[in-house]
Amino acid sequence: MLSRHRRIIAASLAAFSVASIASAVPLTPIPRGDLSVQLQAVATGMSAPLYGTAAPGDTNRMFVLEQRGLIRILQNDVLQPGNALDMTSLIGGAMNPANANDERGLLGLAFHPGFNDSTSPGFQTLYTFNSQPVATGSAITYAAPNSATQNYKTVINEWKMDPSNPSAIDPTSRREVISFGKNANNHNGGTIAFGPDGFVYLALGDGGNANDVGASHIEPTGNGQNLTTPLGKMIRIDPVNPALTPLSANPVSGNGQYRIPISNMGQTQGSVPEMFAMGFRNPYRYSFDKANGQLIMADVGQNTIEEIDRVVAGGNYGWPIKEGDFLFNRVTGPGGNAGTVGARSPGLPLGLTDPISGPAGTLEYDHGDGISITGGFVYRGTAIPQLVGKYVFGDLALRAQPTRVDGRLFYADLDTGAIKEFLLPQFANNQIPNGLTIHGFGQGPDGELYAMMTNTPANGTGGIIYKLVLPEPTSVAAGAGAIWMVRRRRK
C-alpha cells in the first residue's frame, strides 16, 4: 500500500505543477429553495451549544454539549436545570472561552450501542472528544509530528453513567482512551460517533495553521497525505477497555486502552493502524444516515471551497492536493501563491475522491456563500415530510469581518448534488437574526433536528437551540411574498 500511495502522490504533485494557478471562477451561488421551516427556540441563554445526540433507547431526551465543557439534557424540548457532567476543570487551559473563534473545548459525544444492554461491555458507557492540557508526565498516544511543541492534546475519554442517577454522568469514572498532541489551536475536528459496525469513528483535522504547513506538518506532502500521522484522517477503533473483550480478533493498541479493527486501511507496516480514510482538512462535523448507514462528512475549506463528502473505507479525500474538486496550491511556486485554488479538476488526479455530485451539481460552494461549513444530519424525522432524505447543514457565518456573523441554513440532495437555502419566513429577509452563527446541530431520538447557534463566546449566554419545525401557514404566505423583494445575500 505504501509504495502505491507514494506513486499517487508523485502523480498528483506532477499534475499540480502544470495546472492553471489562476484564481478559480466562483461557483454558482446557492439559490433559495422552496422548502420553508420555522426555527422554534427550545433553549436560550446557553454558552455556545454545538452538538446534540440521544442515547440508544432513550425516547425523550437529547444530551447537548456546551463548548466550555458542560453536558446538558434537553428533555421533551425543555432544557433541564444543572449539568449531566461538568468538564470545565478538565478542559482548563486547553481553551480560551472568551475567544469566540477558539475551536477547542468539548466538541463531541457518543453513546455506546450497548448502552442499554446489561450484557454489553458498553453498558451505561459514553465517550467524549475534547481538548485538555498536557499534564506533566502524562503520555500522549500520538504526539504532534516533528517533535513540535505539544501545546495541548485532544482526547477520547470514556465515562459511565451514575448508577444512582440516570441524568448524571459519574465524574470519577473517566478513562482516557486515546490522545493526540496539538501544536496549533485550530483544526481539531470534533465529531465522535459509532458507526453501524459498532466501532467508534473520529475525524481529525490536519494539525492546524494553513496550507497543511507548519511546525507540526510533515513534508513534502502535508499531514493529510502522510500515512504516519493520524492528523487529517478518519480513524476507527473499538474504544471499550480490551480487558472486557478478551475474545475479540482485533489487536490491542500500543497503550492498551482500545482495540484496532483488522479491516482498517491503516493495518499496513509504516502507517497509522487506526486509519479508516484520509485527506481531510478540518472535518468538524459528520454523521451516519440512520436509514442506510452512509457516512456524510462536511470538511471545512480554507479560503475558497467548502465541501460535503461521502466517506468510505480506504477513501482519500484529497487535502491538501485538492480543496473540493479544485487543485490546491499548498506552497508558493511559479505563477501562484500558497493558499489559492487552481484549476477545477473533477476525477483527477486518480486515487482521490471528490465531493458528492449528481446531475444537478457537486456538493460544494465558495466563500461568496459562507466561510466555514457546519455539518449536520440527514433528516429522518416525520414532522417535515418533504425534508426526508435531505442533508441538513449550515455555514458558520456569511462574513468573517469585523466579527463572524450571519450564519446560514441549507439542505442538500445527496442524489442530485443540489444545495439550496431554507426559507425562514419568520425572519426578515429569510435571514437568521441577531448575527447568530451556526456552530452545530443535534438529532433527537425521534430523528427531528435542532440547529445550535450563538452570538457570544463560550463564556457568554448568547447560545440558542432551535428546533426545525414546519412554519405556521400565515408565515409561509408572508415569507413567500417577501422573497421576491429580496436580493440574494452575498459576501
Image (cartoon, helix red, strand yellow):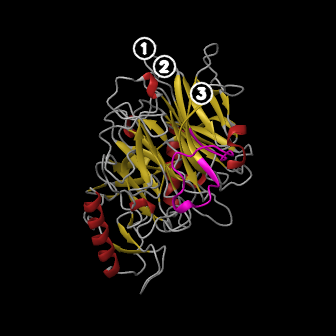
How far apart in space, not on screen, are marks 2 and 3 (Cα)?
26 Å
Tell whether position 22 is magenta. no
Can you tell which quarter of the image residue 464 is in?
top right
In this picture, which residue range is highlighted in magenta? 129-153
The disc label shown at residue 206, or none: none
User: How busy is the neighbourhood of tag 1: few (under 14 within 10 Å), some, or many (20 plus)?
Assistant: few
Can you tell which quarter of the image residue 220 is in?
bottom left
Labels 2, 3: front one: 2
Q: Is residue 172 visible?
A: yes
How far apart in space, not on screen, are marks 1 and 3 (Cα)?
31 Å
In the picture, the quarter occupied by the C terminus is bottom right
Q: Name the residue under label 2.
A: 123
Question: Left or right: 373 with respect to 261?
Answer: right
How far apart in space, not on screen, are marks 1 and 2 (Cα)?
7 Å
Q: Do the residues labelled 1 and 2 touch (CB within 8 Å)?
A: yes
Name the residue nearer the viewer: 105 or 262. Answer: 262
Labels 1, 3: front one: 1
Can you tell which quarter of the image residue 254 is in?
top left
Name the residue nearer the viewer: 35 or 48. Answer: 48
Secondary element at image label 3? loop
**Relative to 265, residue 380 above or below:** above
Which sits earlier in the primary sequence, circle 1 or circle 3?
Answer: 3
**Relative to 326, residue 122 above or below:** above
In the picture, the quarter occupied by the N terminus is bottom left
Q: Mark 3 points at which residue?
A: 77
